[in-house]
Image: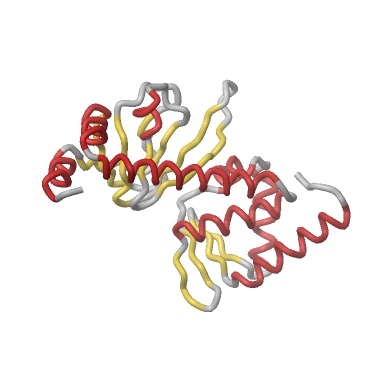
Amino acid sequence: MNEERLRALARDFRLFTYPRGNIIFHQGEIGRMMYVVVSGKVRIYKTTPEGGETTTNIFARGDIFGEFAIFDGLPRSATAKTLTQCDLLQITDDAWLRHFRAAPELAEATVRLLARKARWTAAIAEALAQGDASVRLIRVLLLYVEQFGEAQGEGRYVLDWGLSQSDLATLLGVRREWLNQILSQWQKRKLLILEEGKVTITNLPRLLAERDVLVHKQRDSGTVEQ
């Protein structure tokens, strides 16, 4: 996009600050806004008719969300809630679609964005589709470390994703009690360190080795632990 079009696009964005724990939009609402994360973390989750929650994604700095409802005109497929205080750029559906139609470069970039999201969704689905619950947990940790983990040298990574253990349990589809048990065991073995909303992988090669051992045990036994 040329500079003039970029300036025109920038003028249509508005910056808003949301406190931690704030609902940005609800599942089932009509979507009229698209969002860009400037700072903070946003959790996306689906709600069942019984009131249960299933975490589907976490967005961090530089991520765009809320665009699906703008393009397909359907109600929001999930709820967005801040995990931390967030600064978000917002643009209305009318403004975005006007720029989208006028700028082929923007349309092309949007298609690439949607393709990356589709790949990410497929990667998460694959991580959760096979292996026992411990293996699924390690795979999800590794995916999010790749997405926004902070490397600290010598195989040490900090994953400051803002998720509670309850949120993580809904992402994995396991009971919180089981998750707390396995995380506590791994912490005692110094595979990781748990803090509020944060996981520190102390030795990535050891965690990868743990995953491989668990996978081989599962293959040998022919069972899958839930």
Specify the quadrant of the image occupied by residue 94. top left
Left or right? Give the position of 225 relative to 209.
right
As drawn, is 182 to the left or to the right of 165? Answer: right
What is the total number of numbered labels drawn onto the structure image?
0
Residue 29 location, x and y as percent? 39, 22
Q: Residue at x 51, y 55 (%)?
A: 144
Question: Depth check: 141 or 67 in front?
Answer: 67
* Quadrant of the image occupied by residue 11: top left
- Picture colour scheme: secondary structure
Q: Considering only vertical position in the picture, is 104 above or below 161? A: above
Q: Is the residue 81 above or below the residue 93 in the image?
A: below
Q: Residue 78: horizontal and vertical position, in percent?
A: 47, 30
Q: Is residue 30 above or below residue 43?
A: above
Please state if 145 lies on the left or on the right of 42 as rendered.
right
- Pinpoint residue 174: horizontal percent, then vertical percent: 67, 42
Depth check: give the residue in front, 192 or 70.
70
Query: From this viewpoint, which residue is outermost toward the right?
Result: 221
Q: In this view, does 101 lie to the left or right of 160?
A: left
Residue at the left extreme? Answer: 4
Q: Which residue lies furthest to the bottom in this view?
A: 154
Residue lying at 28% horizontally and 46% vertically, measured from the top left: 87
Rendered view: 77 above or below 83? above
Task: Check the picture and name the quadrant holding the C terminus.
Answer: top right
At 37% from the left and 35% from the top, the residue drawn is: 66
Q: At which x and y percent is residue 212? A: 73, 64
Frontmost residue, 177 versus 33: 33
Residue at the location (32% across, 47% down)?
Answer: 37
